[in-house]
Image (cartoon, rainbow, N blue to C red):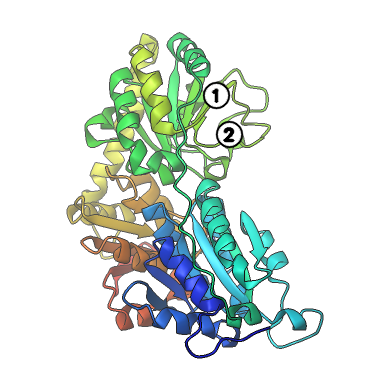
Amino acid sequence: MEEKNMDQKNGADLLVESLIQHGVKYVFGIPGAKVDSVFEALRKVEDKIRIILCRHEQNAAFMAAMHGRLTGEPGVVLVTSGPGVTNLATGLLTATSEGDPVVAIGANVARSMRLKQTHQGLDNVAAMQAVTKSSIEVPVVNSIPEAVEMSFRLAVQKHGATFISVPQDVLLEATDLSCPLPLPQLHFGAAPLQSVEQAVSLLNGAQFPVVLLGLHASQPANLEAIRHLLKRTAVSVVCTFQGAGVVAHELVDQFFGRVGLFKNQPGDQMLDQADLVLTIGYDPIEYDPELWNKIVSSKKIIHLSCDPAEVHLTYAPVLELVGDIAASLNLLTPLLNKVEYPSEKNQSIKKLRQDLEDTITNGKNHQGSLIHPLRFIHELNQCIDKNTTILSDIGSHYMWLARYLRTYHPHQLLFSNGQQTLGVALPWAMAARLVKPQHKIISISGDGGFLFSAMELETAVREEIPFVHCVSGEMAPTIWY
Ligand SMILES: Cc1ncc(C[n+]2csc(CCOP(=O)(O)OP(=O)(O)O)c2C)c(N)n1
């Protein structure tokens, strides 16, 4: 291997050049012997990429994932070999399960050391395979731009984490390759017209159609088309936790709340009665379909999303509309009739909605020295506007927030809804603040989840990333940072 002289570019420089070409603004991570050359290269371009030095690789991965969820562009996390890489596992698993684009870069020992027991050695690619959509190692220095391009494309196309392992000697090798520009972004069209027409006939013929909005529905680009469908048809709508905020305030009379984890919500009763469920952007990991559907069921499902349906015994759509969600809806909506629910059901439907409404409005009436979660939600609601983002951790507070905190903007109330990973809220809040510097950022966790990532408070202070974190004890939220 030829190492560079002082003025020459090496693999680490090429990697950083490649990140710049992909528009990367932040790298979350922790250095270590094998990856130090990349941190050195990053320090030379501080005006282009800001390093957020974290206290644990897992939290760095959480931050990268929230950055990816909010921007649609992969968040980047950078770690050293061995324990640095294995500490990524939970963060990358969470991102991969929940549709968040992340590119994780982990250094490795030099290629010549691969067969030996050596300091911080690990089969990186094998270790990360189970928690990513793609796990590759760069074989030679000039393959770095290809590895970066592939990983960025796959993270976006497959909605999850990808991993690049880079051996230390590859990072130090001299190169004079100029980094090519990234390939242009891919754009997909609507689902085929024939499928749209089939959907029209099924939907217009249904007695009790219900729309179920899932995680891809909450992409801001889909918002207008979804709201137009709801308004034009007056169809009843339910959403998963990750679909929070898609239903507009003016459409709230059609909204039967959020469903997930346990089957006991008004939305579940609507799904039970439905003879046809149109899912939009739904992924079965958000809410196991066996909880709201049976293997042999008279309920028909139409799956409308950017990806084909996962094969699942209890989620077997009669029709799939696969393509750009907004483009498919723009073809579908003008052909749909207004939904008229059977008149004998009107009273029970009305009662379901009223019960949900009453639970939320009664929040203000909960008194006492311990703060009831609904009272907390009521008070929280008083200080939320469209420039507020709320990040929830996992635990009992999660269920209360998911069911009863109303929001009317997508990506305003954010959940880990797939792995339900403890400790996400605080690092997520930091990434949210970086992406939305004008927003008030509020994260909420239980005292258990708080201690999973509380060390990042130091990072927040050092990096000057302000947010408010609330810690709930049993039924008693208290404000911290
Ligand atoms: C990484 C991880 N470990 C364990 C769990 C299982 N789990 C879910 S909620 C919970 C307890 C949460 O307690 P706390 O953070 O105090 O929140 P609270 O229930 O009081 O709101 C646990 C251990 C999980 N979801 N993720």
- Name the one closer to the observer, 277 or 395: 277
Q: Is the residue 355 above or below the residue 164 in the image?
A: above
Percent of width and height locating residue 295: 67, 27
Q: Which residue is denoted by mark 1 in the rendering? A: 301
Percent of width and height locating residue 4: 56, 86
Q: Is residue 215 left or right of residue 419?
A: left
Percent of width and height locating residue 173: 61, 81
- Name the one closer to the observer, 472 or 390: 390
**Which image quarter holds the N terminus?**
bottom right
Q: Is residue 435 left or right of residue 423?
A: left
Query: Residue at (45%, 58%) from the top-left corner?
Result: 181
Q: Earlier in the sequence, mark 1 or mark 2?
A: 1
Q: Is the residue 379 above or below the residue 15 in the image?
A: above
Decide: few, some or many residues near mark 1? Use Cα within 10 Å; few <14, some 14-19, many ≥20: many
- Name the one closer to the observer, 254 or 263: 254
Q: Which residue is denoted by mark 2 in the rendering? A: 308
Q: Is residue 330 left or right of residue 170?
A: left
In which quadrant of the rendered view does residue 419 lie? Answer: bottom right
In three-dimensional space, the C-alpha distance between marks 1 and 2, rounded to whole angstroms, equals 13 Å
Q: Mark yes or no: residue 427 visible.
A: yes
Closest to the camera, between mark 1 and mark 2, is 2
Mark drawn on residue 329: none
